[in-house]
Amino acid sequence: MAIEHHTLSVNKPHSRIPHIVNSLQTTNYPKFQPSPRSLAVAAFSASHALNSKE
């Protein structure tokens, strides 16, 4: 999973955010339904963390 995310971030920098959000929705769906705002914050945080490492 981590390798897949890294590959996506290298090849398509702008396409990784919807992928991250989709992963969060898929992972968390059985437990709870996250709000769009929390998904946006999570996606932004994840994207920012990936950008800082690069």
Image (cartoon, rainbow, N blue to C red):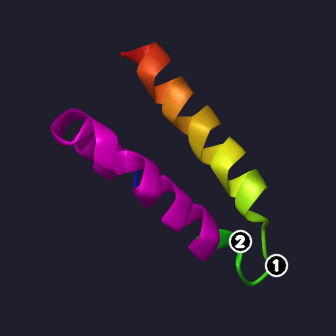
Q: Residue furthest front?
A: 37
What residue do we see at 70% from left, 79% from top? 29
Asked whether the residues under the numbered discs 1 and 2 touch, taking CB atoms below 8 Å apart as contact, a structural biologist would say: yes
Determine the image quadrant of residue 46: top right
Q: What range is drawn magenta here?
A: 2-26
Q: Amino acid at mark 2?
A: Asn
Label 1: how many residues lie within 10 Å, few (<14), some (14-19) or many (20+)? few
Q: Residue 21 in the image: state x and y as whole percent.
A: 54, 59
Which secondary structure lies at badge 2?
A: helix
Q: Residue 11 in the image: state x and y as whole percent.
A: 16, 40
Q: Which residue is mark 2?
A: 28
Give the side of residue 17 with respect to residue 29, left or right.
left
> What mark, if any, has residue 46 been given in the picture?
none
Residue 13 forms part of the magenta stretch: yes
Mark yes or no: residue 3 visible. Answer: no
11, above or below 25, in the image: above
46, above or below 43, in the image: above
What residue do we see at 43% from left, 22% from top? 51
Q: Which residue is mark 1?
A: 31
Q: Residue furthest bottom?
A: 30
Determine the image quadrant of residue 6: top left
Q: Residue 1 in the image: state x and y as whole percent.
A: 40, 55
What residue do we see at 31% from left, 41% from top? 14
CA gap between label 1 and label 2 equals 5 Å
Q: Residue 38 in the image: state x and y as whole percent.
A: 77, 53
Label 2: how many residues lie within 10 Å, few (<14), some (14-19) or many (20+)? few
Determine the image quadrant of residue 24: bottom right
What residue do we see at 79% from left, 76% from top? 33
